[in-house]
Image: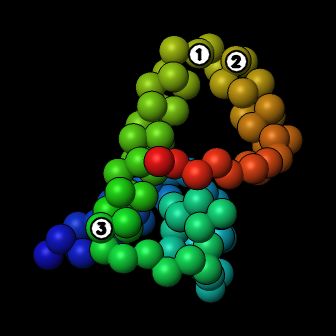
Amino acid sequence: MKYLSIMLSLLLLSACSMPLLALAQPGPPPGLPPFLHGIELNEAQQDKVFAATYAHARLEQQLLAVLTPEQRQQAQQLHDGRPGPRHLERAE
């Protein structure tokens, strides 16, 4: 039941933030950050990644709600041109 709930939540999250075409292509689970692709995570790690991803998406939606439509468009354009993570620091 927990697995089904997590998968359903990931599916809904990814449907809101990714093009539907990307969901139809084979690859890593939806919503997984690109730098984690190909890394085998245990269930506890998957739960933590999901929680962080969900919290980030929720925060992003709350911040976007504050902006005007023009500002949202500008933010989207800036986001589209942004490179991925430049480096990863080890979390202690």
Disc ID at residue 67: 1
What's under tag 1, amino acid-wise?
Leu
Disc ID at residue 71: 2
The answer for how far apart the CA atoms under marks 1 and 3 are is: 35 Å
**Residue designated by label 3:** 44
Label 3 vs 2, first from the N-terminus: 3
Label 3 residue SS: helix
Label 1 vs 3, first from the N-terminus: 3
29 in relation to 59, above or below: below
Dividing the picture into quadrants, the one containing residue 13 is bottom left
Disc ID at residue 40: none
The answer for how far apart the CA atoms under marks 3 and 2 are is: 38 Å
How far across and down, in percent of the image, does residue 86 sit?
79, 48
Callout 2 environment at 10 Å: few (<14), some (14 to 19), or many (20+)?
A: few
Left or right of 47, for residue 77: right
**Cβ atoms under marks 2 and 1 closer than 8 Å:** yes
Q: Nearer the viewer, residue 82 or 24?
A: 82
Q: Which residue sits at x=30%, y=67%? A: 44
21 in relation to 91, above or below: below
Tell me if residue 61 can be seen.
yes
The answer for how far apart the CA atoms under marks 2 and 1 are is: 6 Å
Colour convention = rainbow
Q: Residue furthest left?
A: 1
Left or right of 55, for residue 34: right
How far across and down, in percent of the image, does residue 54 sit?
40, 48
Q: Nearer the viewer, mark 3 or mark 2?
A: 3
Label 1 residue SS: loop
What's under tag 2, amino acid-wise?
Gln
Dividing the picture into quadrants, the one containing residue 42 is bottom left
Label 2 residue SS: helix
